[in-house]
Image (cartoon, rainbow, N blue to C red):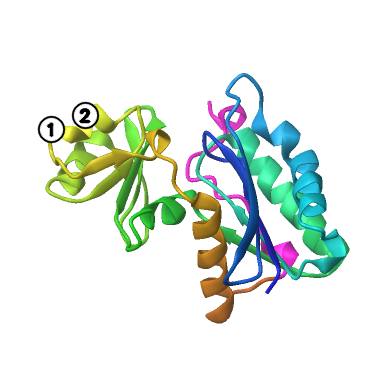
Amino acid sequence: MRMLAFDTCLDKTYVTLSDGETFKNEIILSNKENYHSAYLISTIVKLLKNSGMTPGDLECIATDIGPGSFTGIRACVTVARMFAQQLNIKAVGVSSLEILSKIHGGEDLVALDARKNKAYVYDGKILGAIELEEADKLVKGRRVITDNALIERFRQYTENIISYQEGNFPLGEILARVALEKIQKGIDTNWGSLKPLYIQPPPVWSK
């Protein structure tokens, strides 16, 4: 299945092309001075051109739906819905927590900074935004994927911990593989069903 996968939710933007098994090409943006989402469309166009493909060659769009940057989540979901609707192809959303859980090839516990003394936690499923004191108990003795904001805090509870921000992990490939697995399991792939995952409300919603 010819799939375009992309993510602007995390600290790096990546756009990946896959035919289901082979990953044809990938572009990663990591300029922290700008919103990566502002370059998403132009990066997709560049990647398709470099791969000798057009949007009409695509059969599926896969995207990260959050949690992460609120601007990035909106950009991902909006662009994915637009492409899928216009091309009449499948659309699949995958949580950034599930993507990161598979960095080592299995499924590890993920705990990311959610601010307000909370962490977004994934342990086989999304547990939500939980208090850091509760997250401390969950990470104890586990293999953990976290971020730069929480790695030192959690290191006192487990030595088997990494920050995804400090590694060069194939997140685009992982996203595409997870999306394909979801399709094979019969997930709803209608573009209208693709929604952003806001575990906590965006700042404009908060009182």
* x and y, in percent, of residue 182 in the image: 54, 72
Name the residue that disc number 1 marks: 156
**In this rendering, position of residue 194 left or right of residue 115:** right
Quick one: 70 or 4, which is closer to the camera?
4
Give the numbered dot on residue 153: 2
Looking at numbered disc 2 in the image, what kind of residue is underneath it? Arg
Q: Which residue is found at the position 50% from the left and 54% from the top?
A: 95
Quick one: 70 or 172, which is closer to the camera?
172
**In this rendering, position of residue 84 left or right of residue 202:** right
Question: Which quadrant of the structure image shows residue 8?
Answer: top right
| Residue lying furthest top | 33
* x and y, in percent, of residue 142 in the image: 17, 51
Question: Which quadrant of the structure image shows residue 37?
Answer: top right
Note whether residue 87 is visible: yes
What is the span of residues highlighted in magenta in the rendered image? 190-207
* x and y, in percent, of residue 160 in the image: 18, 45
Q: Which residue is found at the position 87% from the left and 61% from the top?
A: 86
Name the chief secondary structure element in magenta. loop
* x and y, in percent, of residue 93 in the image: 60, 59
**In this rendering, position of residue 179 left or right of residue 199:** right
Label 2: few (<14), some or many (≥20) within 10 Å? Answer: few
Is residue 199 in the magenta section? yes
Give the numbered dot on residue 91: none
Q: Is residue 13 above or below residue 53?
A: above
Q: Is residue 123 above or below residue 60?
A: above
Note whether residue 16 is visible: no
Is residue 76 in the magenta section? no
Looking at numbered disc 1 in the image, what kind of residue is underneath it? Gln
The secondary element bearing badge 1 is classed as loop
Q: Are marks 2 and 1 in contact (CB under 8 Å)?
A: yes
Total labels: the figure holds: 2
